[in-house]
């Protein structure tokens, strides 16, 4: 539909009427919350949608000199600029438009693409069966202190990077725990997705999570793997409204094997939470134990989950609408697709306890 001022002008001219001087429509707002994430020879841009806009234009300049040049036009609220020179800093502006108007330029954002740093597990960790290694310090390779994290790179060698859409990513906070970085989740809508993977836990499972909750959200999940509710689930999170943890898995029929622990979650207290699950055939009932700082806080019988690729995998989010989002800091998540030996558990506990200044036994 044409705007009112266009229709008035048309009718006035058609019938020789004096409709007066019709003001132009109000200007479009400039795009806000523009973000730039540097990668290897590329920069990924995101921005907030502008009410009334039908599209957006992106302009780039090399900071060393030169004017902004338009490089993209489209309807989406994101664009990846590729083929850039690593080590060169680029500045970007975004402008909204419709059929009649163009907004002012957004605030310029800058980014410097660089070759990807190769991530490898630290020597203190066993590598056999290592399926995921997320260290908040590695998020600083693509995000700056205080900025949103939309990419958390996996250092296990399996390239299972955690990702988030703009506006839903946690915040990188440097030197927040034992001198190391954390990712801060707001408890409202922050979470990360993991790629499809994590198929076979017949050799057992060992999970380490270094976390510091700032508020205890009912039913919130630290890690949730599966294909939806009751479908190949492996999950660790808060046990309802209590201060204990809950660990559960599901079998091929969708039945749940689960248990709750003694009180283990305290607001603003950092801790290392560990889950060790025995191996066995798919759907077998096996023993699992959850510990806090190396001391067992609960155990129970769960299912060895079916061997299936899991493609709905979350950090900080649940499948169930009544559950809250995780609120607090995550410093490290390490996952193995086997049950580690007592000696291996001790080595990982010592490493993480020393790294983050935790009283691990």
Image: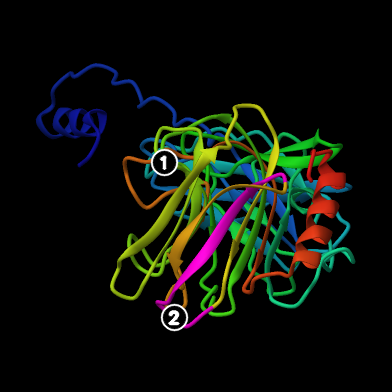
List the single residue furthest toward the left. 15
282 horizontally vs 264: left or right = left
Q: Secondary structure at mark 1?
A: loop
Say which of 188 and 244 sits in front.
244
Q: Is 78 rendered above or below residue 13?
A: below
Q: Secondary structure at mark 2?
A: loop
Q: Quadrant of residue 110?
A: top right
Report how many numbered discs are placed on residues in the image: 2
Say which of 243 and 35 sits in front.
243
Task: Give coordinates of residue 177: x percent, y percent.
Answer: 79, 36
Q: Which residues are magenta?
A: 280-293
- Sequence-wise, the earlier of marks 1 and 2 is 1
Residue 292 part of the magenta segment = yes
Q: Quadrant of residue 306?
A: bottom left
Q: Quadrant of residue 321?
A: top left
- Say which residue appears at 64% left-offset and 74% top-offset: 338
Residue at the spot of label 2: 282
Task: Give coordinates of residue 283: x percent, y percent.
Answer: 40, 77
Residue at the spot of label 1: 219
């Amino acid at each position: 539909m044409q705007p009112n001022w266009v229709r008035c002008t048309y009718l006035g001219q058609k019938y020789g009427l004096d409709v007066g001087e019709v003001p132009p429509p109000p200007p479009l707002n400039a795009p806000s919350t523009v973000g730039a994430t540097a990668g290897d020879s590329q920069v990924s841009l995101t921005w907030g949608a502008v009410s009334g806009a039908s599209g957006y234009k992106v302009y780039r300049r090399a900071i060393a000199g030169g004017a902004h040049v338009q490089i993209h036009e489209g309807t989406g609220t994101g664009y990846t600029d590729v083929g850039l020179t690593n080590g060169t800093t680029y500045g970007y502006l975004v402008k909204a438009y419709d059929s009649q108007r163009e907004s002012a330029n957004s605030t310029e954002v800058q980014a410097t693409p660089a070759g990807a740093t190769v991530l490898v597990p630290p020597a203190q960790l066993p590598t056999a069966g290592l399926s995921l290694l997320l260290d908040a310090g590695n998020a600083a390779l693509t995000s700056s202190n205080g900025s949103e994290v939309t990419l958390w790179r996996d250092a296990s060698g399996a390239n299972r990077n955690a990702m988030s859409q703009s506006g839903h990513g946690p915040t990188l906070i440097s030197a927040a725990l034992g001198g190391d970085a954390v990712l801060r989740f707001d408890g409202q809508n922050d979470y990360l997705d993991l790629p499809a993977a994590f198929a076979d836990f017949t050799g057992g499972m060992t999970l380490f999570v270094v976390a510091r909750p700032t508020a205890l959200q009912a039913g919130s999940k630290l890690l949730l793997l599966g294909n939806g509710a009751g479908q190949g689930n492996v999950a660790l999170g808060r046990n309802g409204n209590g201060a204990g943890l809950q660990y559960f898995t599901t079998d091929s029929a969708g039945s749940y094997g689960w248990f709750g622990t003694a009180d283990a979650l305290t607001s603003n207290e950092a801790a290392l939470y560990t889950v060790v699950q025995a191996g066995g055939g798919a759907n077998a009932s096996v023993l699992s134990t959850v510990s806090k700082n190396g001391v067992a806080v609960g155990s129970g019988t769960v299912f060895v989950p079916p061997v299936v690729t899991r493609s709905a995998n979350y950090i900080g989010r649940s499948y169930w609408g009544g559950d809250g989002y995780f609120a607090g800091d995550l410093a490290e998540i390490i996952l193995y697709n086997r049950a580690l030996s007592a000696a291996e558990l001790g080595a990982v506990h010592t490493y993480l306890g020393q790294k983050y200044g935790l009283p691990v036994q």
